[in-house]
């Protein structure tokens, strides 16, 4: 199943056949079918429309962040509820429409009363506006035109994206609020929070993110089948209750980023200024190194380090995104409400650019002595080539990292060791650390320890790696191999006395498990000076 990008924002035309307005196409049935979890909100709006029959109206604001489905909600809630003789006018604000006085109001009136001379009168009022003073006078007369239309019969005016409406429309909306209580006039404005000061309203209907149960239901409805539970959870986590993102992810049946999803999110973020977008991108790159499954966030201190901006300046930059519901800020923690938004922002640039940004962030975090897991998160998110100074930093901090997040330390070492172009000396150091840490977790480290022992010229390192391999064999019950490694190290020499003592103790432990033919005697050169065999 695919979702037409138009369904992201259904056309705000009159969906009520025979209402006296322009007969327009309502959103596709798929949108209505997937409008789940909004029953109470729909009932409130439908009750307000039904009250027009008693010549009582009101002003309602439908509020929700981008992607909450305000357009689909309005079309669904007002479907087939207009009283007899009623008219519905639909319009949508835009950044372009803000420049034309009464532009949104005129669009509403034209769709409700396409052949009425009041439309022409409103156009003339728009042409008269030259400054604030003329706007005030024209707004009063425009409000009179709307009152006259409502006196002729029930009238519903719906303005989506009212936060982007022109100043004239907003002023008339406020002037008409008191009139709605005395005549069959229903004003419905849909807004995003925090974009602009909305007109006053008698009632606010808040469209919030869908809870998990409704989000899961929406995913099942869009997919048309019962998907794997893990897939449902992944989609619900990525979209965080945002109906638009839930639909788009469910339509593809995966959490992969698609052009439709990128298009939708770009539209939701396009009006943010440069400073806000740069800060959002920085947060997205920090988030890419976050180990959390369900949370997409970063620390404010980390963001200040990687951007070179003060904490208060960053909060100012991000304030529009916080007001718009893209981010939340709680103390030192900054989080995306939807992980999928962070992923889209992170992947919108080229792969080489992402590597460059993550390398820079890792370097700045390391220089500022931020926790090692934050630095490593950036190295892995790139993925950043780990060589030279990065290897030095990693080996200096790997034990601290292991104590805090063992799996992250091992993942980092494994990725560093497997990268092409890594210097042999760096590969040797990294593999040795990998053997040490795997041994600490009682995991098999034989391959790593054997490789280092075979390639190092340092007798101390060779002895250490042989010791780790022998212990691993002992733990796995490979007694003969453990004894053979111990014998080889005692034969070759070079290990300190404490290490030799350990190998002898290991041979003592192996003795009961070995056949007599596998019990070698050691020459004088590797004993403590006495011509004796190993004490079995």
Image (tube, rainbow, N blue to C red):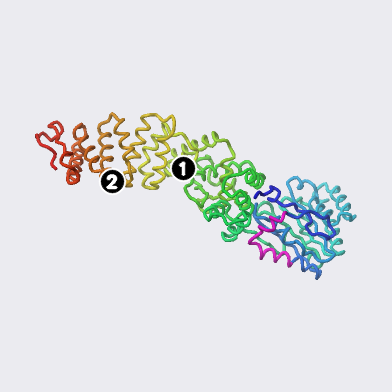
Q: Tell me which residue sits at (72%, 62%) in the image.
A: 77
x and y, in percent, of residue 66 in the image: 65, 52
| The magenta segment | 28-47
Which quadrant of the rendered structure holds the C terminus?
A: top left
Label 1–label 2 contact, CB within 8 A: no
Front position in the image: 218 or 180: 218
Task: From the viewer's perspective, tell me whether residue 401 is left or right of residue 491.
Answer: right
Which mark is nearer the camera, 1 or 2? 2
> From the viewer's perspective, is 256 left or right of 72?
left
Count of residue discs: 2
Q: From this viewpoint, is residue 319 visible? A: no
Q: Which SS class for mark 1? A: helix
Image coords of residue 332 (percent x, y): 50, 51
Would residue 64 appear left or right of 446 to someone viewing this image?
Answer: right
Residue displayed at 14% across by 39% down:
534
Q: Earlier in the sequence, mark 1 or mark 2?
A: 1
The residue beneath circle 2 is: 476
Q: Residue at x 41, y 30 (%)?
A: 422
Q: Nearer the viewer, residue 204 or 215?
A: 215
Q: Quadrant of residue 503?
A: top left
- Tell me, yes or no, whether the highlighted magenta stretch contains residue 7: no
Q: Which is the main secondary structure of the residues drawn in magenta?
A: helix
**Residue 377: image tag:** 1
Give coordinates of residue 180: x percent, y percent. Answer: 79, 65
Q: In the figure, 347 relative to 187: above or below?
A: above
Question: Which secondary structure, mark 2?
Answer: loop
């Amino acid at each position: 199943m695919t979702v037409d990008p138009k369904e992201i924002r259904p056309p705000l035309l009159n969906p009520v056949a025979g209402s006296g307005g322009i007969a327009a196409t309502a959103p596709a049935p798929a949108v209505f079918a997937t409008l789940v979890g909004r029953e109470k909100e729909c009932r409130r709006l439908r009750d307000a429309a039904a009250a027009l029959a008693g010549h009582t109206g009101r002003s309602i604001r439908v509020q929700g962040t981008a992607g909450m489905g305000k357009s689909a909600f309005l079309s669904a809630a007002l479907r087939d509820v207009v009283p007899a003789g009623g008219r519905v006018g639909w319009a949508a604000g835009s950044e372009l429409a803000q420049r034309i006085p009464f532009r949104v109001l005129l669009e509403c009136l034209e769709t409700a009363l396409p052949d009425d001379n009041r439309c022409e009168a409103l156009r003339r009022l728009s042409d008269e506006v030259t400054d604030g003073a003329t706007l005030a006078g024209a707004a009063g007369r425009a409000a009179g035109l709307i009152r006259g239309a409502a006196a002729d019969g029930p009238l519903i005016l719906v303005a989506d994206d009212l936060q982007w409406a022109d100043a004239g429309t907003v002023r008339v909306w406020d002037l008409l609020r008191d009139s709605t209580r005395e005549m069959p006039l229903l004003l419905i404005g849909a807004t995003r929070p925090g974009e602009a000061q909305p007109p006053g309203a008698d009632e606010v209907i808040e469209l919030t993110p869908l809870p998990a149960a409704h989000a899961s239901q929406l995913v099942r409805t869009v997919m048309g089948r019962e998907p794997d539970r893990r897939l449902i959870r992944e989609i619900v986590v990525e979209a965080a209750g945002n109906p638009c993102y839930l639909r788009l992810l469910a339509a593809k049946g995966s959490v992969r980023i698609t052009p439709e999803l990128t298009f939708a999110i770009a539209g939701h973020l396009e009006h943010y200024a440069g400073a806000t977008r740069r800060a959002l991108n920085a947060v997205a790159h920090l988030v890419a190194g976050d180990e959390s499954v369900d949370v997409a966030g970063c620390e404010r201190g980390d963001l200040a380090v990687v951007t070179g901006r003060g904490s208060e300046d960053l909060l100012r930059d991000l304030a529009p995104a916080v007001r718009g519901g893209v981010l939340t800020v709680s103390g030192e923690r900054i989080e995306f409400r939807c992980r999928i938004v962070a992923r889209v922002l992170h992947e919108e640039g080229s792969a080489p650019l992402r590597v460059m940004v993550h390398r820079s962030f890792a370097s700045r975090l390391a220089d500022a002595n931020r926790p090692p897991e934050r630095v490593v998160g950036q190295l892995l998110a790139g993925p950043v080539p780990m060589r030279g100074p990065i290897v030095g930093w990693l080996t200096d901090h790997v034990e601290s990292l292991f104590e805090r997040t063992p799996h992250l330390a091992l993942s980092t070492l494994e990725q560093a060791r497997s990268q092409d172009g890594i210097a042999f000396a760096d590969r040797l150091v990294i593999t040795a650390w990998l053997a040490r840490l795997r041994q600490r977790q009682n995991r098999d480290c034989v391959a790593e320890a054997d490789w280092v022992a075979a390639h190092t010229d340092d007798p101390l390192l060779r002895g250490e790696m042989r010791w780790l391999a022998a212990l691993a064999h002992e733990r796995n019950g490979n007694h003969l191999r453990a004894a053979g490694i111990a014998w080889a190290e005692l034969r070759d020499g070079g290990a300190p006395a404490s290490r030799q003592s350990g190998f002898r103790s290991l041979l003592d432990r192996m003795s009961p498990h070995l056949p007599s033919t596998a019990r070698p005697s050691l020459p004088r050169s590797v004993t403590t000076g006495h011509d004796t065999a190993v004490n079995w």
